[in-house]
Amino acid sequence: MSLFSTANHSGIPSGSKNSMRRITNSLGIFLFLLPGLVIFLIFVIYPIFRSIYFSTFDWNGLGPAVDNVGIQNYKDILTDKVFLKSIINVLIIIVLSLGIQLPLALLLATLVGRDLPGRAVYRTIFFLPYVLSEVNAAIMWMLLFNADPERGLLNGILVALNLQPVGWLSDMKVVLFSVFIALTWKYFGFHMLLYLTGLQNIPTEIEEAACIDGANSFQSFFHITLPLLSSTIKTSVYMSVLGSIQQFILVWIMTKGGPVNASETMATYMYRFGFVRFDLGYGSAVAIIMFIFCVVFSLIYQQLTREPDYLTGL
């Protein structure tokens, strides 16, 4: 009996057989992950290290990088008033996104997620802007913001109401908020979809029980719906902040960071030096600083929001 307990019919000990099975499973998992790992190393990790390398050179992208300047590019960036202005603009966009865009998306998700007549049509309409490319959205809003009342819809409405037209994209005090309007229109549908998914995961029995206990709609929303949506809200905030830090296409097409850098972002600043002025060493340093911003925020945010989940208790 002891022989049969330590070996199978082929004479291989059961412990060795389990070890071989684990090795085979691990090898199979590794082979399945290998293509994705290779792509990740080539297109993510390698470019990051190359950017770090080039950021220490005064290099225009033509020929080999030979003029090593150490950390001088980083010193120049962090003392450049235009770059500091771009950081302030990004922070303003983040604050506006968290204070206006995401609450608006949550409100619309709550409305179209209930028994609202025609809610399927509303969902399609609200999500449609996110499907459009950023280039199309930027061109469309440029036409709407046209300073000529005969060409720009918004200024045409203001003139029809006997009001003064506004330089939506030419006034330094207004341009950043004009860009934010376009960003909100473009992206709130995505966040609305996230909230809709979170709402569908909330058991209806909980809200029904609260209603039976005498809770009204506002009490049910603030004391039941919001706490149970906490994980979804965290994800939405996380993606909104990272998206604001990296925002480029819509801003560049609409304003190119102007007028007088009033709508400059870190991404447009990087593109201006790296690809417009062909100072790729300087542009690489800006890209690394943006990368550091994103990594630091991700680490701090995940640490601060690490709380038990209301539904799973984990």
Image (cartoon, rainbow, N blue to C red):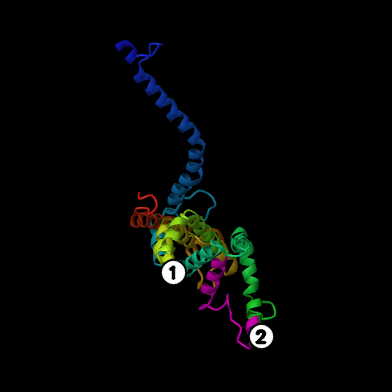
Which mark identifies residue 25? none
State the residue position of label 1: 218
Q: Amino acid at mark 1?
A: Phe
The image shows residue 312, relative to residue 210, as above or below, that is: above
Determine if the magenta segment contains residue 44.
no
* Image quadrant occupied by the N terminus: top left
Which mark identifies residue 160? 2
Q: Secondary structure at mark 1?
A: helix
Q: Secondary structure at mark 2?
A: helix
**What are the residue bounds of the magenta stretch?**
157-185
Residue at the extreme bottom of the image, as rendered: 162
Residue at x 63%, y 80% (from the top left corner): 155
Dot placed on the residue nearer the N-terminal end, 2 or 1: 2
Local packing at callout 1 (Cα closer than 10 Å; few below 14, some 14-19, many 20+) is few
Residue nearest the observer in this picture, 85 or 55: 85
Label tally: 2
